Image (cartoon, rainbow, N blue to C red):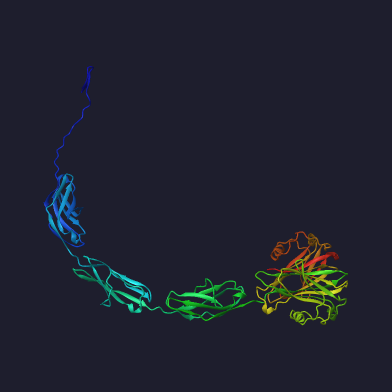
Amino acid sequence: MVSNTVGNVISTSATLSVGNVSGLAPVFVTQPASVTATDGGSFNVNVQVTTSNFSAVAWKVNFGGRSLNAAATASSQANNSIVAAIAFGPVTLVDAATFQIVATNDYGSTLSQARTLTVTAAAPSIGTQPAGQTIFVGSPVSFTVSAVGTAPLAYQWRKNGAPIPGATTATLAFSSAQESDSGSYAVVVSNGVGSVTSASATLMVAAIIPPAIAVQPASQSVVVENNFTIQVVATGTAPLSYQWRKDGRLIPGATGATFSLGNVQASDAGAYSVTVGNAVDSITSNEAILAVTVPNLGRLINLSVLTDIATAGDDFTLGYVVGGAGTFGAKPLVIRAAGPSLGAFGVAGALDDPKLELFAGTTKTGENDNWGGSAHLAAALSAVGAFAFTGPTSRDAATEVSIATRDNSVKVSAFGNAIGKVMAEVYDATPAASFTTTTPRLINVSLRKHLGAGLSAGFVIGGATPLRVLVRAIGPSLGLFGVPGVVADPQLALFNGSSVKIGESNDWLGTAELSAAFAAVGAFPLPATSKDAALVATLSPGQYSVQVSGVNNTTGVALVEVYEVP
C-alpha cells in the first residue's frame, strides 16, 4: 500500500514461491579399474554413478596433467543410477600414468579414485599393401607401404625373398626399370616389439618391341580431282608414332597410320613413305608411288576464219582469253594469217601479203608480216596440225608466242593497200601429253568484223570429253561501247564438222539460262530486249563453225564469241 496526506492505494498481489534445493553432484558407486592399453590404441573403463533428478552426466579423463573429454561408448540409466563404459584414446607410451574419471552433472563434478594406465609398445602392422605393376623397360616405377606401430619402424624390402641392399624406407623406387628388375617384392616392417611382412607385389618389366612394317603402303593411280588415301600397318610396342613424307620431305600434320588427300592435283604425284617409331627405335616404309592421271579434258584449241580484206585499209580482229580456274603459267600459241598459200587449195583472189599485229589489252606486243621460213616455226605449225605454207619465202604471216596475260587480240590487215581473201587462225600449242588441270586454256575466242553478206568462223574442241560452250553474235549492244556501224539484228547458226546445223539463235530473249552463262564466263551482260543472238551447247570434241548474218540481209559490224562454260 502507498499513502500520503491525501489518501492511499493498494497494488495488485504478487506470489513468491521458495523451492526445495535437493540436487547433488554424481557419486561413484563403481570405481574404474586400472587398465593396460597398446601404443596407438584406446582404453575403456567401466563406472557406475548416481545422479540427482535424472540429470545427464558428462565425462572427462584426467591423466598426465591433462583433462580431456571422453565419450561413453555404452550407457544405461535406471532411476538415478548410470552405468557407463568410458572410451579414450589413442594413447602413446608417454601417456602411461595414473588417471581419474571426472563425472559432471547439473549440480557439480566428482573425481573417481586414481587408477593406473599402463601403455605397452605395439608391434608393426600393415595399413596399405604394395600393389603389383606391369611396365615397359626404361619406365620409372615405385612400391609403397604404409605401416603403424611403436616407432621407430624399420623397413627392409625383399626381391624374391632376398633382402635388397639399401632398400630401407617405406618406398622402393626404380628410375629406369629393366627386365632384370622383374620379380616378387615384399617389405618387412619391424620395431622393438616384433615384425610383419607385407603381401607380395609382382613387378613385370616388359621389353619394348621395336616397330616393324606388317603391310607396306601401296602405290596407286588416281584420277585428278578425286580422293587419295594411303595407309600402313605396323607392329611393335605402343604407343607408335607416324610421320608421312612426300619425296623425302615431311608432310606437316600427317601423323597417323592413314594419310588422305582430297581433290588430288597433278602436283600431288610423287613418292610417299612413312616413318613409324616408338620409345626404342623407328623404321621407314617402302616408297609408294602416287600417279595422278589427268583426263584429256575437252577444251578450245583453235579459232579460224576465212574472210576478205574487202577494201584498202580494211582489217579485222581475233580475240583470245587465256586462263581458267586453278591454272597458272604461260600459254604457248601459234597465230597466223594465210594469204598466198591459199591458192594451193584453189582459193581465188587470195590476199598476197597479210600482216599480223598482236596486243595484250591495248598494248602492242608484237607483229609479223612475212613468216620467214623458220624451221622452228614450220615445226610449230606442223605440231598444231596447220597446213604447210607453200614455201619459206611465201608472204604469209605467222608467229609463235607464249602468252601470260589474260585478254589478248591479233589485228589482221594487208600490207599496203592490197585486198583479197585471208585465213586467220589461233592455235593452242600445248602438246596434249603435257596438258594438266593447271595448264592455262583458251577460255574464250572471238572475231570482230564487218559481216558483209555473212561471216563464218570455225573453232575446234580438242581433248576427249565434251565441252559446254556459250556462242554469241553481238550487234546492237556493241553500240553501247561506241562501236560504229554495227549490225542491227544478227542471227547465228551452229554447225558440226559434217555441216549439220545443231543450233541457232536470232534474239537471245533475256533468258535466265543465258544470263547465268554470261555471268559464269565473265561476258559483258546484254539488255534483255536486245536483238543480239546467243545459245549454249554441249559439244563433243571435233570441228564446228558459226555462221553469222543480218536478219533480212542487213549487215554491219558484229562480234562473234565462243566461251568455255565451267
Quarter-of-image position of residue 553? bottom right
Q: Quick check: 383 left or right of 88? A: right
- Camera-nearest residue between 140 and 519: 140
- Camera-nearest residue between 431 and 221: 431
| Total number of numbered discs in the rendering | 0
Q: Is residue 80 visible?
A: no
Q: Where is residue 430 in the image (x, y as percent from the top left)?
A: 70, 77
Question: Taking 484 as reference, is 204 above or below it?
Answer: below
Q: Where is residue 510 in the image (x, y as percent from the top left)?
A: 74, 61
Quarter-of-image position of residue 204? bottom left
- Camera-nearest residue between 491 and 315: 315
Q: Hey, which residue is sitting farthest front in the picture? A: 166
Q: Is residue 10 visible?
A: yes
Quarter of the image with the N terminus is top left
Q: Position of residue 297 (x, y in %)?
A: 67, 75
Quarter-of-image position of residue 397? bottom right
Q: Quick check: 451 left or right of 460? A: right
- Camera-nearest residue between 562 and 506: 562
Q: Quick check: 519 left or right of 248? A: right
The residue under the point 85% across, 71% down is 309
Q: Where is residue 211 in the image (x, y as percent from the top left)?
A: 45, 79
Quarter of the image with the C terminus is bottom right
